[in-house]
Amino acid sequence: MARAVVKLPSTIRRGEVIEIRTLVQHTMETGFRRTQFGEVIPRNIVRSFVCAYNGEEVFRAELHPAIAANPLLTFTTMAIDSGTITFTWTGDNGFSVTESATIVVV
Amino acid sequence: MTSRRDFLVTAGNLAGGLVLASAAGAARATPAAMQEAIRKVVGSAQIRRGRVKLEVAPLIDNGNVVPLAVAVESPMTPADHVKAIHVFAEKNPLPNVLSIYLGARAGRARVVTRIRLADTQTVTAIAELSDGSFWTETADVVVTLSACLEEVV
């Protein structure tokens, strides 16, 4: 099971724009590298990332082999309400990781 | 005066160099391929320069991990916001690097990530706004150690 890390600010006021930092453990094998015997190593990457705030999609990313290993994505969202933010990474070979964070807006 | 030996050595080096260059060329996208990839995203719309800020160091030691930030000037209101940001690299094996989709709820149009660069090249970011306009910015990056090409032992 791949590890995923999500970081949100500790105190959040309503209407504030918060920065969310995400990281998932993945080799992001490009599909262009070869072994010393000349065999192509098949591609194995994270294809997409979706962030949903209380069920509503607020950020989506399409990743390509040019993203470095252990994909890091930092983005912003407006803190509208308390609730949960879910983060989903999906990729080749059935890779799927879901992480959620609780957000408390004061 | 070139001796026979010198001539042969030079000829051998040249031939070797050509073979290496063509082998490396096969695994590269070209600026033309990048233009094609950009057209696929943008369609026939005009791309204007400005509003986008591409933050990447001009000199990169390791092409495997290149910190990259893209920010777009926008009020991010429901009427006027950034819909998508696309990043392209002209000399990577594939021109596409990253596409992100956001809306007015993002508050700010800024994304940070880490990318791979196979060679010294120009990185292009394109932002799609809610009014249908496209804005771009490019950055020249010198890469000392290329990504993608090393062998796995």
Image (cartoon, rainbow, N blue to C red):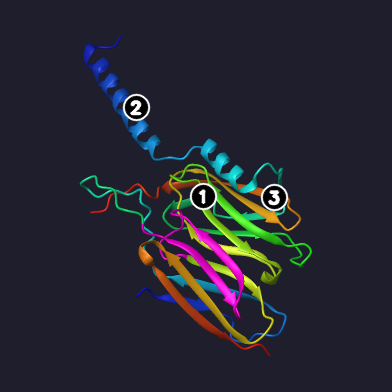
* Label number found at residue B43: none
Please, is residue A23 above or below residue A84 in the view?
above
Residue type marked 3: Trp
Nearer the camera: disc 1 or disc 2? 1
**Residue that carries the numbered disc 3 in the rendered image:** B135
* Label number found at residue B18: 2
Q: Is residue B59 magenta?
A: no
Label 2: which secondary element: helix
Q: Residue at x 54, y 36 (%)?
A: B32
Give residue B104's position: percent from left, percent from top: 71, 68
Q: Is B135 displayed left or right of B98 in the figure?
A: right
Please, is residue B118 above or below residue B19 in the view?
below
**Do pointers 1 and 3 mark residues of a single chain?**
yes
The magenta-colored residue range is: A44-71
Badge 3 sits on which subunit? B
Badge 2 sits on which subunit? B
